[in-house]
Amino acid sequence: MDMSTRETSPAAPTQSGVSAAPKASTPDSGVARSFAILLGFQCLGELIVYVTRAPVPGPVLGMVLLLCLLSAKPSVVPAVEQVSRGLLNHLSLFFVPAGVGVMVFAPQLKSQLFALALAIVVSTILSMAIAALVTGMLLTRLDR
């Protein structure tokens, strides 16, 4: 029988007598795919904001679109879960550039200290109020 025309299974011995192991996807390919999905949605959000001139940051819109996809098609969740967990585990590192920016622009921020403090207090109160309203609505929905 001619070896070049014979079909072999992935674990069949090769001409050298060594069994070839079946190829499996590496963990790195899953990580790359997850990053590609996350970055793809960020770029999609940026593109939509650029085209529509929406007053929303592109990455925020991209994450909302990703949330819609994950809600509609839960089978995609495992594809982004590993990278998402890794990013969340190191979330504090993403605040370093903002902290450095505060230190670099401290003189300009000092001149606007009252406005900044007011904005922080008001936005915190609004966030807490909205969270309380949403929680109340969800709890009443669960009680039905």
Image (cartoon, helix red, strand yellow):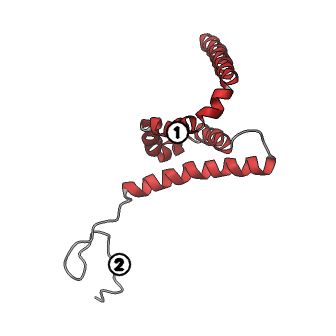
Q: Distance between the residues labelled 1 and 2?
A: 61 Å
Residue 50 or residue 8, whichever sits in front: 50
Query: Residue at (56%, 48%) from the top-left corner?
Result: 38
Task: Give the position of the N terminus as an image quadrant.
Answer: bottom left
Select label 1 or label 2 by which is in front: 1
Residue 115 or residue 11, whichever sits in front: 115
Report the residue marked by disc 2: 7
Dot 2 alpha-carbon crowd within 10 angstroms: few under 14, some 14 to 19, many 20 or more: few
Report the residue marked by disc 1: 100
Query: Residue at (62%, 41%) from the top-left corner?
Result: 63
Decide if residue 92 is on the left or right side of residue 126: left
Query: Residue at (80%, 46%) from the top-left corner?
Result: 53
Identified by mark 2, the residue type is Glu
Decide if residue 104 is on the left or right side of residue 134: left
Mark before the other along the chain sequence, 1 or 2: 2
Q: Residue farthest to the left?
A: 17
Identified by mark 1, the residue type is Val
In the rendered image, residue 77, in percent from the top left (x then y), is placed at 51, 42
In the rendered image, residue 110, in percent from the top left (x then y), is placed at 63, 27
In the rendered image, residue 79, in percent from the top left (x then y), is placed at 48, 47
The relative height of residue 78 versus residue 106 in the rendered view (above or below) is below
Q: Examine the image and state in which quarter residue 134 appears.
A: top right
Q: Examine the image and state in which quarter residue 12 appears.
A: bottom left
Badge 1 marks a residue whose secondary structure is helix
